[in-house]
Image (cartoon, rainbow, N blue to C red):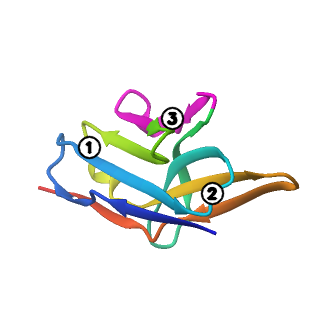
Amino acid sequence: QVQLVESGGGLVQPGGSLRLSCAASGSIREIYAMGWYRQTPGKQRELVAITTRVGVTNYADPVKGRFTISTDNAKNTVDLQMNSLKPGDKAVYYCNCIEQLPWGRREYWGQGTQVTVSS
């Protein structure tokens, strides 16, 4: 089992920055990818950014050029640097980890951290 612990959410003014962090712990065989998703009330959870262990990275169009995902493979952590935040970025952000197993992959989620962008 893998546990994900997130930190770094909060309230920020439009144009401001926040950094989210997530650490994976537990019995980890091998991490295939780590990333961030977000969800607002009444909507489906959506991808924000994800990166694989070999460095393939994907960003959602609304955050390209503003958000940067980074990982520390040795520490099994993933960060999300969010700059130029907009009110539309307000959401609960979830850390995601995909574990590579001999027979397939398993997905884990963090508990979520609230990001509010408001003046």
Q: Say which element carries label 2.
A: loop
In x, y percent, where is residue 47? 55, 49
Disc 1 marks which residue? Answer: 85
Image quadrant occupied by the N terminus: bottom right
Check if residue 79 falls in the magenta segment: no
Disc 2 marks which residue? Answer: 28
Q: Residue at x 44, y 66 (%)?
A: 40
Q: Residues within 10 Å of mark 2 (few under 14, many from 20)?
A: some
Check if residue 58 falls in the magenta segment: yes
Quarter of the image where one finds residue 44 = bottom right
Is residue 41 positioned above or below 24 on the image? below
Q: Which residues are magenta?
A: 54-70
Q: Which is more toward the observer, 19 or 16?
A: 19
Q: Residue at x 24, y 36 (%)?
A: 84
Q: Which is more toward the observer, 71 or 90?
A: 71
Disc 3 marks which residue? Answer: 61
Left or right: where does residue 35 sit relative to residue 116?
right
Q: Say which element carries label 3.
A: helix
Give how far apart the Cα atoms at labels 3 and 2 are: 31 Å
Q: Which of the marked residues, 1 or 3, is nearer the chain's N terminus?
A: 3
Q: Say which element carries label 1.
A: loop
Is residue 11 positioned above or below 85 on the image? below
Q: Amino acid type of disc 3?
A: Asp
